[in-house]
Image: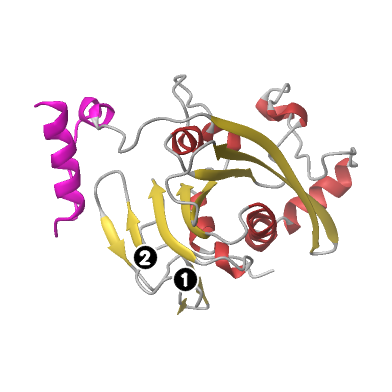
Amino acid sequence: MSTNGIDEKYLDGLNSAELLLKLTWDEWLAVNAPFGNVDFSVEEVTARYNRNGYDWDIHGTLYVPTKEVNSRRAFVCFHGGAGSEKIMDLTPDGRPGLARVLASQGFKALALTYPGHYPPGGVWKQPIPERMPFYLLDRDLSDSEILDRNLKCTFNVILQGAGLLTDNHLAGREIIGFGHSTGGPMAAHLTRFSKKKLSGLSALAAAARMGGVKNGATKPVPKNMSKSPSIIFPSGRRIHSRHQAMSIRQT
């Protein structure tokens, strides 16, 4: 199949009523980018905030294209549970990560790292069994405090930091959230701690119904989210959901 044929197959699949769009890996790699590439700058950003009795630091990378496709929108990228924003810059096999691709296509993007996941310089030097979270970026913490923070670094602690970075650096924009794995529900709930409108969601290997269930009751998507955002998965599955099914801690 020609490259143009693959593009048509992909677009037709997203616009169809079918839940599954079947593409081979080679076909995925052959899908063309919709816009011409532009240069972009990269800036490290941080924020400190307080929740659950502690101060927390959150780190992110802001990607700013020299020419934007749409200056009213921006992307916020959430990594999987054990990862960091680095996966949004470079993939494990050496290709440009999602945030870098978005910026090169003319979209402003913020990739963030959950509190504790960003070591000095962003790269872990210790083997996995010896790693301890860096909840504050400018000081060392005692082992006992880190263990206590481990219990208090909840879903809402992460979201509060994500909302703060979003509001500080993406003012005046509608947000399209992207989440990988654990990051899917994070992206879906961003507006609980951000003043921004969430106009769309995209996820990879995340729960199809991304949200919260507490005591058996389904909790709706936040009110300042668009009425029917499209959640599009790389499989081609598109879901319009106002309800959610992930158990979250409310502290």
- Is residue 24 within the magenta segment? yes
Q: Residue 222 in the image: state x and y as whole percent.
A: 51, 74
Q: Which residue is drawn at 38% across and 73% down?
A: 242
- Is residue 214 within the magenta segment? no
In the depicted view, which residue is nearer to us: 148 or 176?
176
Q: Which residue is drawn at 41% across and 60% down?
A: 200
Picture mark count? 2
Q: Is the magenta stretch mostly helix, strand or loop?
A: helix
The reply to whether discs 1 and 2 touch (Cβ–Cβ < 8 Å) is yes
Q: Mark 1 points at which residue?
A: 225
Badge 1 amino acid: Met
Note whether 58 is above or below 191 in the view shown. above
Q: How would you rate the neighbour count of disc 1 (Cα within 10 Å): few for under 14, some for 14-19, many for 20 or more?
A: many
The residue furthest left is: 1
Note whether 242 is above or below 159 in the view shown. below
Badge 2 amino acid: Pro
Q: Residue 205 in the image: state x and y as whole percent.
A: 39, 46
For mark 2, give the secondary structure.
loop
In the picture, the disc for residue 250 is none
For mark 1, give the secondary structure.
loop
Q: Residue at x 88, y 46 (%)?
A: 144
Q: Where is residue 128, by image quadrant? A: top right
In the depicted view, which residue is nearer to us: 230 or 84?
230
In the picture, the disc for residue 229 is 2
Q: Which residue is drawn at 46% across and 31% down?
A: 38
Left or right: residue 231 compared with residue 72:
left
- Residue numbers of the magenta segment: 1-30
